[in-house]
Amino acid sequence: MANELIAPLMGLAGVIVGGALGILNSHFAVLRQERQKRHDERLKHLEEIFECLERTETDFFSFYTFQFYSMLQGKIDAPKQATEFPLGRLELLIKLYCPTLTPSFATLIALRDKCANCYTSALMSVATKDIQKMTAQLQPIIPLLKEITAHCATMKTEVVSLAVKRT
C-alpha cells in the first residue's frame, strides 16, 4: 500500500516544487524589470542633465560673445529676444537625480555671476559713454566664458562617468 501512495505523492511534490519555482521565477522577473526601469529612468535624467549643460555652454558663449563684440563695435542694443539659460531646470535635475554635482553647479553659478557682473558694469559704462572703461570691463568676459566652457565640459564628463558606472 505504501508503494501505491509513492507515485501520487511524488507527482504532487513535483507540482508543488514546479509551482513554487514558477512563482519565484515570475517574482525575480518582475524585480529585474523594475530595476531596469529605474536604471532607464536614471539614464534618461542623466542625459537630460547632459543636454542642459550642452545648452548652457552654447547659450552663454553665444549670448556673451555677441554682446561683447556688439559693444566693442558701438552697437549697444538689447537682445531682440530674452535669452533663457536652462539653469533652473539644471539645478532641479541635479538636486533630484545627481546631487554629487551640486558643488560643481555652485561653481558654474559663481562663474555666471562674475560674467554677468562684467557685462552689467560694461553696460553702465556705455550709459556714461566711457568707451575705455567699457572695454576694460569687457576684457574678463572672454576668459570667463572659456572657464564656463571648461567647467561645463568637466560636469558633462562627470555625468557620463555616472551613467557608465551604473550601466
Image: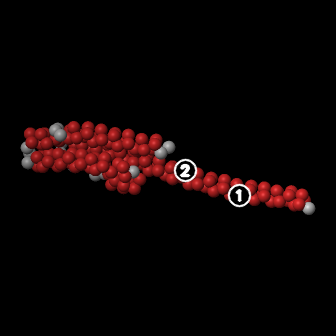
- Which amino acid type is marked by label 2? Gln
Return the residue at label 1: 20
Q: Position of residue 45 (x, y in %)?
A: 44, 50
Sequence-wise, which precedes: disc 2 or disc 1? 1
Q: Are marks 2 and 1 in contact (CB under 8 Å)?
A: no
Name the residue located 74 percent from the left edge and 55 percent from the top edge.
18
Q: Give the spatial CA distance, label 2 vs label 1.
A: 24 Å
Residue closest to the eye, 24 or 63: 24
Q: Amino acid at mark 1?
A: Ala
| 103 relative to 140 in the view: left or right | right
Left or right of residue 47: residue 127: left
Front residue (pair 159, 166): 166
Q: Does dot 1 land on a helix, a strand or a loop?
A: helix
Q: Position of residue 33 (x, y in %)?
A: 58, 52
Of marks 2 and 1, the one in the foreground: 1
Which element carries disc 2, helix, strand or loop?
Answer: helix
Is residue 89 visible from the viewing direction of this image? no
**Front in this rendered view, residue 68 or 153:** 153
Q: Which labelled disc corresponds to residue 36?
A: 2
Looking at the picture, how far across and down is residue 142, in whole percent? 22, 38
